[in-house]
Image (tube, rainbow, N blue to C red):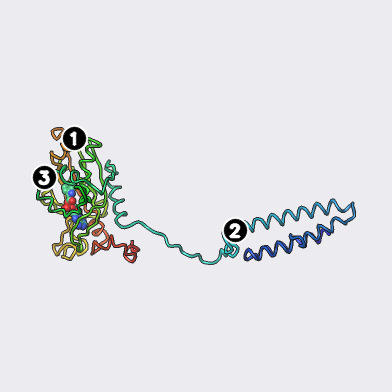
C-alpha cells in the first residue's frame, strides 16, 4: 500500500509538470483528488486495513494528500493570476520587446538648461499660461497703445485676458512674490497668433531668466549666457550680441547663434542670413523693478528670454520648427 501511495505521488507530480491550462488542471484534480479519484480510492482502502498497519499507512496517505493538494493549489493560483500562458513560459525563448515612451526633445533640452542654471544657484519656477494684459504687457513697461505690443501677435481672450506671448509675464509676478535678491528661471509654453514657417510656430517654448541683486551688471549677464551655451552644446558655438529694443530692459540686446542647421551658409531656418535669433536679454528696466516692489536705487539685475524651441532645433539640427509640436511619431522616435 505504501508503494502504491508513493507511485501515485510520483505520477501526480510528473503530470503536474505538464499542466498546460486551467482545463488540464481541473481534469487532474478530478483524476487524483476527486470523489472517485485515485487517492480518494486508496484512502477508502486504508479504512479496511488491519489495525496494526492502519495508523502508519493512514498517516502517510494523509501526508501525501496534503502535499498533492498544496501543489495543486499553488498551480491553480498561478494560472488565476497570470492566465494560462504562465504555465507555458519558456525561459529559453527570446522575449518580446515592449515599446516604451521617452522624453520629448524639448523636455530633454529644457532639463539640460535647468541643470546648468541650478548649478549656478538659480531656482526653477512655473507660472500661468493664461495671463492678464497687466502681467504680459503693462507691468513690463508696455502700456496700452505702446507700439511694442504689435510685435507680439496675441491670442486675445475675453476681458483683457490672453494666452501669454512670452515667459516674461512672470518677471513681475516673481518679484512681487519673492522680492530681491532673486535668481530664477521659468521655462514654459508661449503662444503667438502668427503665420508659421520653418522657424516660427504658434506654440513654442521659451525659458526666461531673472537675476536681481546689488551690483549686478552686463558682465554677469554675458558670463551667465556663456555658461549656459557651453553646458548645452559641450563645445564652442559662434554667437553675436547686437543692440535690441524691449521696453522692459535697458540696455537691451539680441543674442544670435550661428545657424547650426546650415553651418552659417544660409537656409530656411535662418532665412538665408546664417544667424538665428536665440536669446534677447538686457538689464531689467527700473520701471519693472518698481512694478515688482523692488527699489531700483538699491538693486539691479538682468533678464533674458531664451527661445528654447529654437535651441532644440540648433542642438539637433532640426530644419522645421513645426515638427516639434506635430506629434509625428516618425519624427519623435528619433530622439
Ligand atoms: C521676447 O519674447 C522677450 N520676452 C524676450 C526677453 C526677455 C527680452 C527678457 C529681454 C529680456 P522675442 O519676441 O524676441 O522676445 O522672443 C524671444 C525668443 O523666442 C526669440 O529670440 C525666439 O528664439 C523665440 N521665439 C519668438 N517667437 C517665436 C515663434 N513664433 N516660434 C518660435 N520661437 C519664437
In space, the residues marked 2 and 1 are separated at their CA atoms by 66 Å
Quadrant in the picture for residue 132: top left
In space, the residues marked 3 and 1 are separated at their CA atoms by 21 Å
Identify the secondary structure beneath mark 2. helix
Q: Earlier in the sequence, mark 3 or mark 2?
A: 2
Look at mark 1 in the image and give the residue it sits on. Answer: 293
Q: Which mark is residue 142?
A: none
Image spot of residue 83 (x, y percent):
57, 61
Q: Which mark is residue 80?
A: 2
Q: Viewer-nearest of labels 3 and 2?
A: 2
Look at mark 3 in the image and give the residue it sits on. Answer: 251
Image spot of residue 44 (x, y percent):
82, 58
Label 3 C-beta lies within 8 Å of the nearest ligand 1 atom: no
Residue in view at x 86 percent, y 53 percent = 54
Identify the secondary structure beneath mark 3. strand
Crowding near pointer 1: few (<14 within 10 Å), some, many (20+)?
some
The C terminus lies in quadrant: bottom left
Q: Please say whether residue 7 is visible from this viewpoint.
A: no
Image spot of residue 21 (x, y percent):
62, 65
In space, the residues marked 3 and 2 are separated at their CA atoms by 72 Å
Identify the secondary structure beneath mark 1. loop
Crowding near pointer 3: few (<14 within 10 Å), some, many (20+)?
some
Image spot of residue 17 (x, y percent):
66, 63
Label 2 C-beta lies within 8 Å of the nearest ligand 1 atom: no
Q: Are marks 3 and 1 in contact (CB under 8 Å)?
A: no
Image-based side of 46 in relation to 229, left or right: right
Label 1 C-beta lies within 8 Å of the nearest ligand 1 atom: no
The N terminus lies in quadrant: bottom right
Amino acid at each position: 500500500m505504501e508503494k502504491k501511495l508513493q507511485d501515485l505521488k510520483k505520477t501526480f507530480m510528473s503530470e503536474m509538470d505538464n499542466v498546460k491550462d486551467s482545463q488540464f488542471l481541473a481534469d487532474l484534480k478530478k483524476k487524483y483528488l476527486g470523489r472517485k479519484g485515485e487517492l480518494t480510492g486508496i484512502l477508502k482502502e486504508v479504512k479496511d486495513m488491519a489495525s496494526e498497519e492502519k495508523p502508519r499507512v493512514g498517516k502517510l496517505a494523509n501526508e501525501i494528500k496534503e502535499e498533492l493538494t498544496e501543489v495543486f493549489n499553488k498551480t491553480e493560483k498561478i494560472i488565476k493570476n497570470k492566465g494560462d500562458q504562465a504555465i507555458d513560459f519558456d525561459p529559453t525563448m527570446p522575449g518580446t520587446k515592449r515599446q516604451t515612451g521617452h522624453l520629448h526633445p524639448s523636455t530633454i533640452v529644457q532639463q539640460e538648461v535647468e541643470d546648468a542654471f541650478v548649478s549656478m544657484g538659480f531656482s526653477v519656477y512655473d507660472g500661468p499660461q493664461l495671463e492678464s494684459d497687466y502681467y504680459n504687457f503693462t507691468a513690463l513697461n508696455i502700456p496700452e497703445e505702446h507700439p511694442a505690443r504689435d510685435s507680439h501677435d496675441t491670442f486675445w481672450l475675453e476681458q483683457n485676458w490672453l494666452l501669454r506671448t512670452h515667459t516674461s509675464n512672470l518677471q513681475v509676478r516673481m518679484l512681487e512674490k519673492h522680492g530681491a535678491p532673486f535668481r530664477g528661471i521659468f521655462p514654459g509654453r508661449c503662444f503667438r497668433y502668427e503665420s508659421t514657417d520653418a522657424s516660427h510656430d504658434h506654440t513654442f517654448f521659451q525659458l526666461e531668466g531673472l537675476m536681481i541683486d546689488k551690483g549686478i551688471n552686463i558682465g554677469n549677464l554675458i558670463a551667465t549666457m556663456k555658461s549656459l551655451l557651453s553646458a548645452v552644446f559641450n563645445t564652442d558655438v559662434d554667437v553675436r550680441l547686437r543692440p535690441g529694443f524691449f521696453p522692459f530692459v535697458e540696455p537691451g540686446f539680441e543674442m544670435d547663434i550661428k545657424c547650426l542647421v546650415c553651418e552659417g551658409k544660409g537656409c530656411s531656418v535662418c532665412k538665408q542670413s546664417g544667424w538665428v535669433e536665440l536669446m534677447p536679454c538686457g538689464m531689467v528696466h527700473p520701471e519693472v523693478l518698481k512694478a515688482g516692489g523692488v527699489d531700483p536705487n538699491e538693486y539691479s539685475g538682468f533678464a533674458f528670454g531664451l527661445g528654447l524651441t529654437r535651441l532644440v532645433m540648433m542642438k539637433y539640427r532640426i530644419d522645421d520648427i513645426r515638427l516639434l509640436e506635430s506629434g509625428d511619431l516618425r519624427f519623435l522616435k528619433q530622439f
